[in-house]
Amino acid sequence: MLPKFLLADNSQVLPDKIFVIHNEQPRFIVGCNVEAFSVDQEIYWIDDEPESKELKKELLEQAEEFMDLELEYEEELYKLENEEDDDDEEVDNQK
């Protein structure tokens, strides 16, 4: 089973852009600025675009929430890894 959302990037070609992929019907990809979801936003519908504006709004809100939480988690993970590296370096220096 695939997750409902995925993050993707192509940082070598589009360093300031990130893509949120929705894997459930209706499937779509949202390309947006890494710093702000609604900046330079482009929506690519894989399935037929829903006619309901409310559904589209809800799906985009879910995509934004997913992106924010994932980027926050990655940031926390990066901080934790750096702290562990600093601790290891400190132990090595004490030897």
Image (spheres, grey):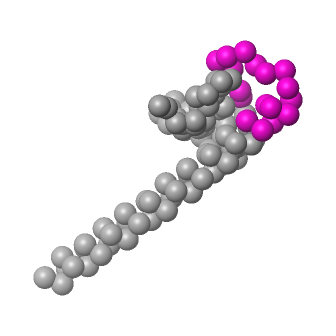
Res. 20 image quadrant: top right
Res. 77 image quadrant: bottom left
Left or right of residue 13: residue 16: right
At x 61% / y 45%, what residue is drawn? 67
At x 79% / y 21%, what residue is drawn? 50
Res. 32 image quadrant: top right
- Residue 40 appearing in the image: no
At x 79% / y 31%, what residue is drawn? 56
At x 67% / y 48%, what residue is drawn? 65
Q: Nearer the viewer, residue 29 or 89?
A: 29
Left or right of residue 3: residue 53: right
Left or right of residue 42: residue 7: left
- The vertical placement of 56 against 38, above or below, is above
Measured from the top left, where is residue 6 in percent x and y? 54, 36
Measured from the top left, where is residue 22 in percent x and y? 61, 31
Q: Is residue 51 magenta?
A: yes
- The vertical placement of 66 against 19, above or below, is below
Left or right of residue 29: residue 94: left
Q: Nearer the viewer, residue 12 or 3?
A: 3
Magenta range is 42-59
Measured from the top left, where is residue 5 in percent x and y? 58, 37
Q: Nearer the viewer, residue 18 or 1?
A: 1
The outermost residue toward the front is 1
